[in-house]
Image (spheres, rainbow, N blue to C red):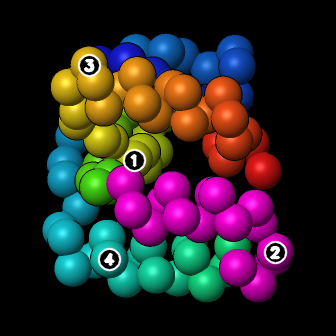
């Protein structure tokens, strides 16, 4: 697994996936997140990225025993490099 983004640069980098959040629950959370992002006038590229990328929502832990949620996207090398190119054009993970 490749970690693309973490808000905390000094946090543990190992991730132990625990449980996939059910799709229906994830879709409700995603809709609410998109509404909040829109209300906060987030960069349009961020909204499009979250809406169109087939993320899964997982619960996970790290080496410190911290519990958290993460978005997981499984792709091939072509999909990964396209996402990397898009990030270079639009800094959607940081806006």
User: Do tag 1 and tag 4 residues touch (Cβ < 8 Å)?
Assistant: no
Q: Residue 80, position in %: x, y?
A: 36, 26
Q: Which residue is mark 1?
A: 71
Query: Of marks 2 and 3, which one's residue comes earlier in the chain?
Result: 2
Mark pair 1, 4: CA separation: 12 Å
> Which image quadrant is residue 21 in?
bottom left
Q: Nearer the viewer, mark 3 or mark 4?
A: 3
Q: Which residues are magenta?
A: 38-53
Left or right: where 74 falls relative to 12: left
Query: Of marks 2 and 4, which one's residue comes earlier in the chain?
Result: 4
**Is 72 rendered above or below residue 65?**
below
Q: Which residue is mark 2?
A: 41
Q: Secondary structure at mark 2?
A: loop
Q: Nearer the viewer, mark 2 or mark 4?
A: 2
Q: Nearer the viewer, mark 2 or mark 1?
A: 2
Q: Which residue is mark 3?
A: 77
Q: Is residue 23 magenta?
A: no
Q: Residue 9, position in %: x, y?
A: 70, 19
Q: Secondary structure at mark 4?
A: helix
**Is 21 rendered above or below residue 83?**
below
Is the stretch drawn in magenta largely helix, strand or loop? Answer: helix
Query: Of marks 3 and 4, which one's residue comes earlier in the chain?
Result: 4
Q: Is residue 46 magenta?
A: yes
Disc ID at residue 27: 4
Left or right: where 22 falls relative to 28: left
């Amino acid at each position: 697994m490749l970690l693309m983004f973490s808000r905390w640069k000094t946090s543990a980098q190992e991730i132990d996936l625990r449980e996939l959040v059910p799709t229906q629950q994830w879709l409700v959370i995603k809709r609410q997140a998109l509404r909040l992002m829109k209300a906060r006038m987030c960069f349009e590229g961020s909204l499009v990225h979250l809406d169109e990328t087939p993320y899964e929502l997982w619960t996970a832990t790290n080496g410190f025993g911290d519990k958290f949620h993460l978005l997981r996207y499984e792709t091939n090398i072509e999909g990964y490099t396209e996402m990397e190119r898009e990030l270079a054009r639009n800094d959607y993970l940081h806006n």
